[in-house]
Amino acid sequence: MKICIKCNPTSMLIRIFSLFVFIILAHNVMGGKGKVPKQPLKIIVIDPGHGGRDGGAHGQISREAIVALEIGLKLRDALKKELPDVKILMTREEDELPGGLQNKDAALKWRAEFANQNNADLFISIHLNACGANQRYGQRVIGTKEQTYYVTTGKGKKKKKVAKTRTVNIYEKYKLPASVKGTQTYILARDWYERKVNAAGKKVEGEGDLADSASQDLYDLDPVQARIMAQQYAKYFFQKSLTLATYCEEEFAQQGRYSWGVLQRDWEGIFVLQATRMPSILVETGYVDHNEEERYLNTDKGQDEVAHAIVNAVKRYRDVLINPARASSANDTAVIADKKSQEKPLVVSVLKDRKTEVAETITTSSKELVVSFYDNAEVDGDTITVYDNNKAVISQQGLTVNPITIKVVFNDNETEHELVMVAHNLGRVPPNTALMIVQAGSKQYRINLTSSDEKNASVKFVYSP
């Protein structure tokens, strides 16, 4: 039966009005672009580090592989509950290397390939840290004892040894309190390949005293493949990795955890970060060799809080992908940030909780400075982290006779820079002492810096053309 508008005008108007409302609703649901908004997160891979014969770092009551797995499983369950539309995959769910492998290098490759083959949208690796500074020992007096010694008296035939006694101290060796704790989240530096092209396909050397669990052997990687992956990472994944990592550290700080902030790994690569073709982070959830932190990370409460912080970070990350506070530029290098982060930038705990002393303020007309750090005393395993305006630019690198060099660049938005040197591993002879050499055009500055568990050292630079 056909209905003519002349025959039933009221009915037809209702139909037209209904169709109009439907079009408006559909337009709103589809974001006004003629299609349903794309779900930015479909698959997340959680990677509990180490496993099986690769136990990772050890504490007094636990080992990294076990605690990382327990946190990873709690994170999986929490993500499934909070993001039921997202598929959560685990690289391992038992205390074993993933893929049934026995070689940790092969297992590293398996982890990355697992994420790549499943077309994951995020890769989150869970670890615990350890540091040589937490393994320092001292000596203390626990009593005295009488000690017999001999002196020679007389001459010639009258020469003889005479026994005497003296009181001497009795010492015992004891472990100094662990001083390094807290969270940190690693991402691969944007220009990792350019800085470390020779490291591709080679084995990462040990970090000396620093048992940083992010120091892992690189699986052999074809240099051409490494270059392609590095370029993909820099173009598509760096900013997203940085955003998620920043959210993680913000959430940890909100919980009252000691945060070292986001560290860009640029001195050597981390295989699971450099070989995954998606935004990837490696979360150091705490120090297993810090007694208090180890006990916390071995409790359900501590593990639940760690998982909750990461879940909150992932939810914030997903939200800004759907409704970015600042639109990405064509080459995807624009900042992705939510309003909360823009209003209250992350200042890591080590900068808030330790006193920072300004060693010198330098005014310069050079728009670019070259800054180098050397150990200016005995090379004893000192390790430092350096922040430039609250952003880590040197991450847990050892001071030696060879320079650690960075560039400081002024622009219209940043006419002042403050470099803060933070002691991470105090070495055998505390505190950390460094010689900073600053090359500003034809001028050179030499500054001695000292940092400890209680104090940071900083140098301020002011640009005045």
Image: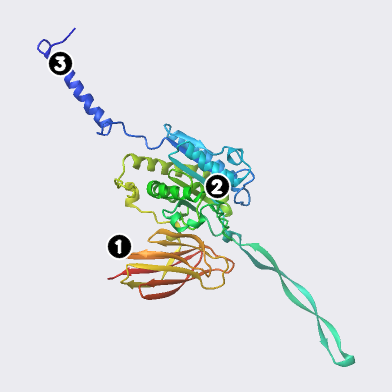
Q: Position of residue 461 (x, y in %)?
A: 35, 69
Give the camera-side residue of 179 and 268.
268
Mark 1 or mark 3: name the one nearer the start of the chain: 3
Give the camera-side residue of 237 and 150.
237
Of all residues, the one furthest to the left in this rendering is 6
Please name the amino acid that badge 2 sits on: Leu
Which quadrant of the view contains residue 412? bottom left
Residue carrying label 2 = 297
Local SS, label 1: loop
Res 368 seen here: yes
Residue carrying label 3 = 12
Which quadrant of the view contains residue 204? bottom right
Q: Position of residue 232 (x, y in %)?
A: 41, 47
In the rendered view, does 444 fall on the left or right side of 199? left
**Label drawn at residue 411:** 1
Mark 1 or 3, which is nearer the eye? 1
Mark 3 or 2, which is nearer the eye? 3
